Amino acid sequence: MIGCSNSQSGTASANKKPTIGVCFETLQTEFWVAGLDAIIQECNERGVEVVQAVADGDANRQLQQVKSFIVRGVDGIILVPKDTKTCGPMIKAANNAGIPIALFNRPAADKDSKCVAVVADNLKLAEHTTAYLLEKAKARNTPIKAMILLGDLSDENAINRRDGFNAAVTASGLKVDVVSQVPTEWNQEKAQAGVVNGLQANPDINLIFTSSDFLLPSIVSALKASNHYFKYDQPEHVILGGFDGDATAFQLLQEGYLDATGVQDVYFEAKACVDSVLKMKDKQEVASTIADPGFVIHRENMDEKKKEMWGAKSK
Amino acid sequence: MRLKSTMLRASEALPFVLACGLAFYGAMTISGFTSVNNCRNLLDVYSPLLIVCLGQMLVMLTGGIDLSATSTMALCSVVGAKLMSEDIGWVEPSAASVYIAVAAMLGVGFCIGAINGTAIAYLKMPPFMVTLTTMIFVGGLATYVTQSKQVGGLPDTFVNATTNTSLIVIVASVFSTCCYLILKNHVYGKWLFAVGQNVRTATVSGVPTKEVIASSYVLSGIASAFASMIYTGQLATGSPSLGENLLLDIIGAVVIGGTSLFGGRGDVRLLCGGVLFFVLLGSILDLMGWSPFAVMVAKGAMILTAATVDSLRARWSQA
């Protein structure tokens, strides 16, 4: 449980609107843009002013942006760190200034620091998504040859998604041959090259799981180029699963090319972050980790679940 | 003619004029901009960027470019961190491990600079291709060594030293003063300019052009290693992606700081102004609280304006 005092925010007087500094590592994918929009909307609804900064993937720059927020005298900080370790000095700087800080979607490695992390259960969500894909693969009664697109392995979320995939493979009891693991480092070009190479070396790959939906255009392009791009009702269909729940995933799900994706609830995470920061500002106790339960969306539950999918709304 | 020479003289101070304008705007409009904490933050950003820019300037004076500066920083960061980390260090944690790590970081910077310099000066390979290739190779090596993982657990001695604002300002000042004196008074400085202006003429005049070109890359590598130490200490983490997106800032600050991309022209004082302009621009845009998209557009527009004015200045000086 965490409680922060706000000793240095002298510029924010009691009758003044509170200000939250929101610092994103990047806005290069739909997920982060949707997250920023959701945080701003939540702040607007609560009468909180927002100052924003984006670090363009540079952790040193992000540290300076957090320090700038502190200089500016914000009442709280919401941070999307580049990774779990480099955010340590940022959290310390906020702690030293007595400013509450919440991490959106990515946890910190240093468990001793005072912050609230709002994160999806990446491992479970990836496991459930993969379990669904394997169920579909099992029904085909053919050997399963799988490919997984890994994220940046300095990102704990990427590691948990990989581990969730592996856990589902182990738990299924099926003979799954994971013939290709593509290290994308969250880069579309690397993803596309990796999938093309993987499909060239193993043209019989029939199941692909990507650690993030923003890599789906790269996969689609590679599948088309290698004549592997077919809908779910065709025998040549490559079973495809993802994670995040963005607009591309929703469109591919509707069109029948994507089988399932694990959806992170952006609105829940944004609300929880703003809520936690305001509570800590008022010296209330908040849990150090708030889990976004998320859900798996697939063809069978699409009509029911699409109203909760942020990608379906942003489309 | 007199008007032109007056404008030329005035325009030489352009980076400082722009930086002063930004500082004045920040002081007038942003609460806390002139506070001690913010000044310290600005110096924390300014010092390592200035060091790596000085190395880049020496290379650019010879008509070359060092695209591998940021990858060199990344490899130095992970090698140093791997050596001294108290979690997974390659050597037993001790006071000596920090010195070993620092020496290794400088060694890595020296070696990468030497590889670049040898390929460019002695094998006559184009600087752009050589340093681009080194950038890819060294960046890949940093990722491979760490398997993309960040290296934490750096000793307090190292972190405290590299986050001590006074100390890093002193290091940056020593660097810039040495560069200034060498370029202004030492024969090596004259050789750097001579090689950049016309390499054939320099050779005929007895300048050891190969040694001058190669050594400029070595100095750039060492400067990158020093900058890497500060950046690594600030994050208390060795990172294979350290400085990943910093290359354009480095080259942009050097060019706005009056160094010609074609070689033979540059001044340490103007470079200090160019770096200051970049740092203030970033800080003010962050503090203004604009939408990130607006910040990117504003930053691009400001840099384009500064580069255009600098280009006009270069044209006046040639006319």
Image (spheres, coloured by chain):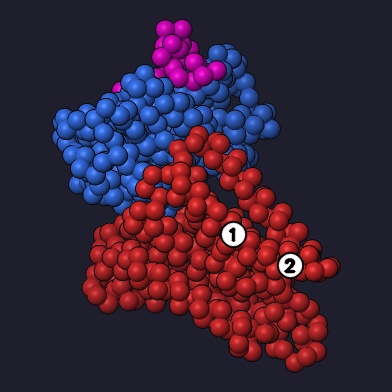
- Tag on residue B6? 2
Q: Is residue A126 left or right of residue A232?
A: left
Image point 44% across, 30% down: which residue? A36
Q: Which chain is red?
A: B
Specify the subunit that label 2 lies on.
B
Q: Main secondary structure of the magenta part?
A: helix
Specify the subunit that label 1 lies on.
B
State the image coordinates of residue B289 (x, y, percent, origin top left): 45, 38
Image point 35% across, 71% down: which residue? B167
Image point 32% across, 76% down: which residue? B99
State the image coordinates of residue A245 (x, y, percent, origin top left): 46, 23
Image point 60% across, 17% down: which residue? A231
The answer to whether B178 is drawn above or below residue B251 in the figure is below
* B240 part of magenta stretch: no
Q: Quadrant of residue A12?
A: top left
Q: Residues within 10 Å of mark 2 (few under 14, many from 20)?
A: few
The answer to whether A88 is drawn above or below residue A253 in the figure is below
State the image coordinates of residue B155 (x, y, percent, origin top left): 26, 65
What's drawn in magenta, residue-wise? Answer: A293-315
Most extreme residue toward the bottom is: B206
- Tag on residue B17? 1
Quarter the N terminus of chain B occupies: bottom right
